[in-house]
Amino acid sequence: MAVENVSAIFKMYCLTVMTMVAATYTVALRYTRTISTGDMYYATTAVCLAEVIKLVLSLGMLTKETGSFSRLKNALMEHIFCSPKELLKLSVPSVVYAIQNNMAFLALSNLDAAVYQVTYQLKIPCTALCMVLMLNRSLNRLQWFSVFMLCGGVSLVQWKPVEATKVQVEQNPFVGFVAIAIAVLCSGFAGVYFEKVLKSSDTSLWVRNIQMYLSGIVITLIGVFLNDGNKVLENGFFFGYTHWVYFVVLLASVGGLYTSVVVKYTDNIMKGFSAAAAIVLSTVASVLLFGLHITIPFASGALLVCVSIYLYGLPKSETMKTTRQDSDSESKQKLINV
């Protein structure tokens, strides 16, 4: 999709919001799972509530897009109530995203926010692999190089996990890493699958979101009662909720929708800078809030990840142009030598 021609100020606004949402969500979620006092809330209910809010927001955006309630009603009847096959098709990413979101809570219960933010960038090579296999896309040499660089950076970060002195709850870094691994696999597959569904028809993005979130609510409700059913029946759905938990749910709801809207106004380089900036902000917040001790392997790995994100996001046209210029220069040099 081509990036629309908008002002540099608006692009900076998009970049700032994307960065703040990503960093704040990670740090706030980590805070509610480790530092926040009081009864611990059930992560499955938070994931389910986020799906409900996403559905409401998507309905609002579809109402604005259609322009009237009668057109909204017709769109819902055509694409929701009269299209069970489409709902079934969108239930696939719903299941995968539900697993991913629950794994994020599990990972941030066992890993520091900065370590999570760096390691979660493994979603880039996972998404790239899914794009190659599912969409028949191709990667250039620089992108493959950046993928291996990113994996090396994550390996450095995980080589000797950093410690947060202010976190008093019991943690298992291995469980946290396994949870991130599952989350990035889910993120890569679900993102590419959803893109394939979107490009297979002219159906509105908001209609597709509504189809997906309807399935998501059902799936996450099943998850609530399978994992915490007895506890929820005894203590209530909102047991342990504080204003920080509601804030995390709101970020989880708004963040994904906002990113899907503003991404068309930015390019891959800006998204790369956003991810790198989110890593830096998460690290600073972890030092201040959780007493994180920065080690040389962590700093080196985080730097490699930031550089690899930037390299991966470079436009193919520029890379090909540079390669072509180098090739032309070599040819001219050979002619001069002859």
Image (tube, rainbow, N blue to C red):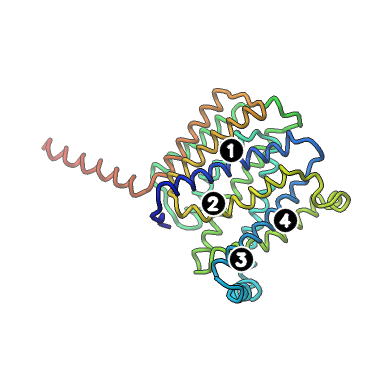
Question: How far apart, in angstroms, are the residues tagged by discs 3 and 2?
Answer: 23 Å
> 159 or 84: nearer the eye?
84
- Residue drawn 61% across the image and 61% down it: 58
Helix, strand or loop at disc 1? Answer: helix
Q: Earlier in the sequence, mark 2 or mark 4?
A: 4
Q: CA distance from mark 2 to mark 1?
A: 17 Å
Callout 1–callout 4 Cβ contact below 8 Å: no
Residue 156 drawn above or below residue 10? above
Is the C-beta separation of discs 2 and 4 under 8 Å?
Answer: no
Residue type, numbered disc 1 = Gln
Numbered tag placed on residue 220 in the rendering: 4
Q: Work out whether mark 1 precedes mark 3 in sequence or the reverse, and give the earlier one.
A: 3
| Structural crowding at the residue carrying mark 3, measured as other residues with C-alpha within 10 Å and reported as few (<14), some (14–19) or many (≥20) | some
Give the CA separation, mark 4 to mark 3: 17 Å
Name the element at disc 3: helix
Label 4: element kind? helix
Identity of the amino acid at label 2?
A: Thr
As drawn, the label of residue 89 is 3
Q: Is residue 210 above or below residue 114?
A: below
Crowd around label 1: few <14 · some 14–19 · many ≥20 (10 Å): many
Residue visible at 71% across and 26% down in the picture: 166
Q: Comparing marks 1 and 3, which lies closer to the viewer?
A: 1
Task: Indicate the quadrant where residue 39 lies.
Answer: top right
Measure the C-alpha gap from mark 1 to mark 3.
Answer: 31 Å
Judge depth for marks 2 and 4 and give the one in front. 2
Return the x and y of residue 250 as percentages of the image width and height: 66, 50
Across and down, in percent, residue 318 comes to 33, 46
Q: Earlier in the sequence, mark 3 or mark 2?
A: 3
- Crowding at dot 4, Cα within 10 Å, few <14 / some 14-19 / many 20+, comes out as many
For residue 259, which numbered disc appears in the image? 2
Horizontal arrangement in the rendering, residue 159 relative to residue 140 (left or right) = right
